[in-house]
Amino acid sequence: MTSISETGQTKASRKEKIGLRLFRSARQAARFNLFLKLLIAILAALFALYPVAWIFSAALSPSNSLVNSRLIPVGASAANFVRLWSDPRHPFLLWMWNSIKVSSLTAIITVSLCALAAFSFSRFRYRGRRSGLLAILLIQLFPNTLAIVALFLLLQQIGKVPGFAWLGLNTLGGIILIYSGGALGFNTWLMKGFFDSIPKELDESALIDGASWAQAFVYVILPLVRPILAVIGILTFIGTYSDFLVARVMLKSAENYTLAVGMTLFIRGQYTREWGVFAAAALLGALPIVLIFLLLQKQLIGGLATGAVKG
Amino acid sequence: MPPKRSVKRLPNLNDQKGGGVIRPTSSSSFRTSFLHMAGLALLDALALWLVYSLLGNGAGTAGILVLVVTGLVNWVFLSDRFYPIRWLTPGLVLMLLLVVYPLVFTVYVAFTNYSDGHILSKQQVVEQLQRRYFQTPDAISYQMTVYRSPEGGFLLFLQDPQGNTYTGTEEQGIQAYPVGGEPPERIGPYQKLSLAGTFQYLTELEKIQVSGEGFQVRITGPNKARQALAKYTYDPDRDLLTDNETGKIYRPVGGSFVDNEGKPLPDAPGFTAVVGLDNFRRVFSDPQIQGPFLRVFLWTVTFAGMTVLLTFSVGLLLALVLNDNRLPLRTLFRSLAIIPYTIPGFISILVWVGLLNPYYGPFSLMIKDLIGVSPDWFSNGTLTKVAILFINTWLGFPYMMLINLGALQSIPMEMYEAAELDGAGRFAKFRYLTLPLLLISVGPLLIGAFAFNFNNFTVIDLVNEGGPPIVGTSTPAGQTDILISYTYRLAFAGGRGADFGLASTIAIFIFLIVASLTAFNFRFTRQLEEVMR
């Protein structure tokens, strides 16, 4: 029977031997290990930055063409931005504005509906509450993009109703409606969790002072849950901004395109000759989202890691 | 001194019994309740208008759904019992209309032949057929005089061989003109046209349709017209369509009218009909569809699986590297590695498509310098798949890095110390300690990522629109299409015509797969426990 110390020693000495074969000391082995890690980190950073560097260089290059493009352009110029601005074939600013309109309205609607629902789930106890929470989660697991055919036919019908044309096919109202359908979902859960962390004594005291539930919600709870409202609003904004499928199916004419659909026009046909303009558009189109991410990294990443995967 | 609780009874927020539900303070003023009522009334008015118009447009199910939902909303807002539900109502209504209803409707469409050529309802098709006419050799011919109103409407004054006179307009149809005799100068607002005047309007006149009971008047010359008989008669009771010209009888079968031998009515549009499991049968037995479907399905699973594997491996490696606090510039590296995650996918995918361009793309040229050939990324199926996986790895590894970093930091250091005492080497520590512990916390997110990529339309469509196409199939499937992009192409990508029925059937397969993944995931995570709190 071998004693524990013996085993430990043999293993340790064997490890030492292996170490000795390659390195003169354990310290050197550790240094090599660190060097390897640094190398991997540098490679990963290069991999991550490779296309980004190309966007910058192509956007700032005086040439518009992909042919003979270089990573370090010969001189910098704003020519591609000027082309982007002046070419009526791709109304970039309009698309960007459409995207921002759709994403912010969707975010506002989602946050409002979600906050109302979370308040109900967090503050009241009633029959069907548990099953309601569960149902919301289960239903939203099937993204409504799976029912894209049905949604298309639904918008087609709504658009035919006099007075409701602004919610039909090929309208921004229509896609906002579709995105808002997904308002209640995992977000409700996140929000309900946050609401639960606000002590009930606070709204109780407001009620005792004669406030209605609505007043307690607006004046007591809402100011306290602003962080989660902001996180969910921003995440919804980013998700909507990046959506491609719904916008692609529902929007037909170029003046109604969101940026995601509009950008695809660049790769049809003239792509290699419009590389610079495309890069300028890509740079400007990505900017708002990248900025939001970099500024709010800490707050957002927590929410993302628990929930959705960004597209 | 603690406040005296007995003075004012606190509302018991956690009372589970029905009676304990907090009601709105009944002190709510007249003004607020008036506003409530006014709001509800406005909503009802809007909803009823919507219902009325939907029903009028033949969208019966949607109309009834809106009606039912409106009823429920009223109930919730008028009954105190449902006070807590009021807070949920706006979200729930949108969810019912835009998530639940479309899902149910998708299932319905999957059992129909709804597609180009079968878009109209049966009633619409019958109405269309009833507007068709044919001419017989012995058809009654008329002497015709044309009249025109100042607004540009036409009236035909017709005289049959027996001398009976009629007037005919598009709106009123054929009516007897009992006065008889020669055509007068004016009939109502209509002014008689001379023969020359009629010539002037001949093209306009050819377009007008003047119908009587079972026949139509065809203009054959400036002063001549003939009767054409209705080609089809529909008997709604027996659900049979008779061709009056040939005498053949047609029955509606599977979305078309067919004769006794099963031959469909020529030049007639089909209609939407429930066809049962036909679409499912097509997926499994029609060789033109079954082959591509299987390929698409296999690639969907491969794509999602490989994506998760690749992004997870790269992300984990990077997380292990960045978790070492001796690493210089750790935060900088971390921020740089997150960058792909911060750029909207549709932008970075398109950038990669440019970089991979086989002729001019800098990335492809770089490969050409290395191995001598530039890979033809977008016309070779296998290479397109490689390109897609490569791009998707770039898009996804930061997310995996983030979640792995979080998970690594939650593994207690004591465990490693214990393992070292037991003599575990670097590899053993990773294999038997880090990886299993990591998978416990990251596993559900991996399944989530799999489900997400299962439906990752954006990357598939933007890289190569699902192409290159699969040859020798009747459906518009591409070699890199996944189920969701295949659905999209079946329903919306023109060329071969939209097949909503088949598209919905494929969507049902996606439902089933996502559902089983989810069920698996729930067992994994016990996310449900939160409900029980």
Image (cartoon, coloured by chain):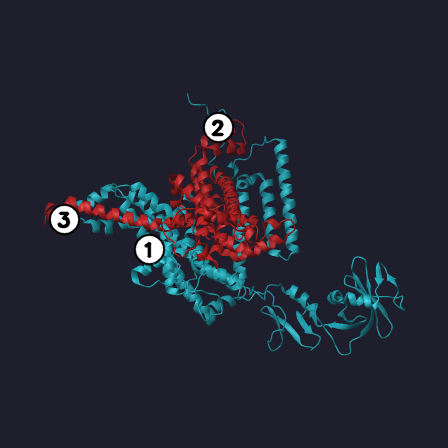
Q: Residue at x 37, y 39 (%)?
A: A298
Task: Name chain B's colour.
Answer: cyan
Nearest the viewer among B521 and B529 is B521
Residue corresponding to mark 2: A205
Q: Residues within 10 Å of mark 2 (few under 14, many from 20)?
A: some
Quadrant location of the C terminus of chain B? top left
Q: What is the three-letter code of the residue carrying label 2?
A: Ser
Nearest the viewer among A71 and B512 is A71
Dot 1 lies on which element?
helix
On the image, the x and y values in percent for residue B348 come to: 41, 51
Q: What is the three-letter code of the residue carrying label 1?
A: Leu
Residue corresponding to mark 1: B310
Q: Spatial distance from mark 3 to mark 1, Cα to Cα?
A: 32 Å
How many circles with numbers are drawn on the protein? 3
Q: Spatial distance from mark 3 to mark 2, Cα to Cα?
A: 69 Å
Nearest the viewer among B506 and B178 is B178
